[in-house]
Each structure stands twice: as C-alpha cells, then as structure tokens.
Amino acid sequence: MEFDYLFQTSHLIRLFEGLWVTAKIAFISVFFSAIFGTILGVIMTSKNILIKAVCRLYLEAIRIIPILVLLFVFYFGFATWFNWQWSAVLVCIVVFVLWGTAEMGDLVRAAITSIDQHQKDAAYALGLSPIQTLSFVVFPLSLKRVTPGAINLFTRMIKTSALAVLIGVVEVIKVGQQIIENSLLVVPNASLWIYGLIFLLYFLICYPLSRLATHLEKVWESR
C-alpha cells in the first residue's frame, strides 16, 4: 500500500519530467563544452605568451572557484548588479559550459602536445599546411588519448548538474524532495525509496558512458 502510494503514476511522471530537465541541462552543456573546449585546447597550444597566460588564467580560475559559487554569482549576483533576468536553467547551462570548456580545453591541449613532433614534421614534408596537419594528422592521433578523459568529464558534468536544485531548478532531485515532503505522513521512509530511485536514474545515464570509455580504451590499446 505504501509502495503503491509512493510510486503512483503522477509521482513517476513528475520524476521523469525532472529527469528530463536534468538531462537537458547536462547534455546541452556537454555538447557546447565539447565544441568550445576543442577550440580552446587548440588555442592553448599557441606559442604566444599572452594567449597562453589568458588561457591559463581562465583555466585556473574555473578550477579554483567552486561551481556552486559560480551558480550563485551568475543567478543572484548578476541579477542584482546588471539586472540580468536569466532563467535558472540558462544560468546552469552557462556555468557548466564555462566549466566544461576549461576542463575539455586542457584535455585537448594535453593530447595535442603529446603527439610526437616527427608526426607533424612528416605531414609538413608531404606538403600539408598547418591546418591540414591539425585536421588530418594531429586530431585523429589525439582522439584516442582525449576520449576517455572527455567521457569521464562529461559523466562528472551530468552528476554535478544536481547542483541546479540550489538555485531553484525543478529537476529530478527537487521533484524527489517535493514527493518525500508530501509523503512522509503516509510513508515515513519515503526518502529511502525516492532517493534510491533517483540513484538508479543517474546510474542508468552515467554507467553507459563509463562503459563506453572502458571499451574505447581496450579497443585503442589493441591497435
């Protein structure tokens, strides 16, 4: 009886709607982080001292400042200072893209710089331009080195998207809290079941990504 009340159809629908909000924030952030991070990673390989310094400052700032602080600054601080009326979902996406771009950029930079110089020299000797060398030699060789780390980053971004609840986004954890609060009198241990289900939902999203990273590592090691 308690189980039926807790997992009635209306509750499950609300949980999956909240999961959709979580997934939307996470996957939009991952998509743009992959694109901007790749561009940033290429820029970070520049030999220009000023460009390298700016990129390093951006990377270290993002790593030092907690994600939660960035969420509060963008959502509460900017609304007060600049009268920016951004939605909580948009703020989450912007902050996660800033974070993901920095981390992805460092992964791409490390992968590119790990390619032996003779690979590039051979491409130049064949008449390839720097852009062609980057596109047809460096990127393909870097891909297998950056993919496992990138997938791990994307998994972390999906899990960290749970912080959206702290600025009022009605995502899966917020919905779970609402259901628990409304069910405590009927189901005293509602939190155990609801958070258990939320754990399972996150697991179903993140575990395939983890397995994909492991599979790709094995495939590329065998080549």
Image: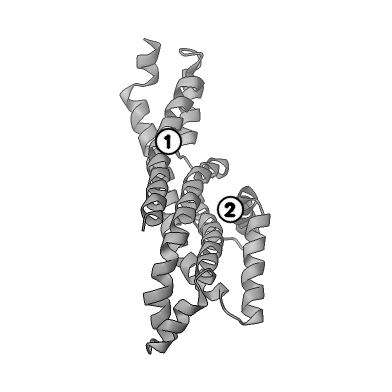
Give residue 203's mark: 1
How far, Cα to Cα, is label 1 from label 2? 29 Å
The image shows residue 17 at horizontal and vertical percentages of 37, 38
Q: Quadrant of the C terminus?
A: bottom left
Image point 45% across, 40% down: which residue? 171
Give residue 75's mark: 2
Q: Is residue 45 left or right of residue 172?
A: right
Which kind of residue does numbered mark 2 sit on? Tyr
Q: Is residue 159 left or right of residue 140?
A: right
Q: Residues within 10 Å of mark 2 (few under 14, many from 20)?
A: many
Which colour style is shown? one colour
The image shows residue 110 at horizontal and vertical percentages of 55, 66
Task: Tell me which numbered mark, 1 or 2, is placed earlier along the sequence.
Answer: 2
The image shows residue 137 at horizontal and vertical percentages of 40, 75
Which kind of residue does numbered mark 1 sit on? Phe
Q: Is residue 9 left or right of residue 194?
A: left
| Residue farthest toward the left in the current orientation of the protein | 9
User: Is 180 drawn above or below residue 72 in the view shown?
Assistant: above
Image point 59% across, 51% down: which residue? 71
Residue sitting nearer the eye, 187 or 34: 34
The image shows residue 192 at horizontal and vertical percentages of 49, 20
**Regarding mark 2 in the picture, which secondary structure is present there?**
helix
Residue sitting nearer the eye, 90 or 115: 115
Residue sitting nearer the eye, 131 or 64: 131
Q: Is residue 23 left or right of residue 67?
A: left
Q: To which quarter of the image does residue 134 belong?
A: bottom left
Image point 38% across, 37% down: which residue? 204
Q: Residues within 10 Å of mark 1 (few under 14, many from 20)?
A: few
Q: To which quarter of the image does residue 140 belong?
A: bottom left
User: Is 170 drawn above or below residue 82 in the view shown?
Assistant: above
Q: Nearer the viewer, mark 1 or mark 2?
A: 1
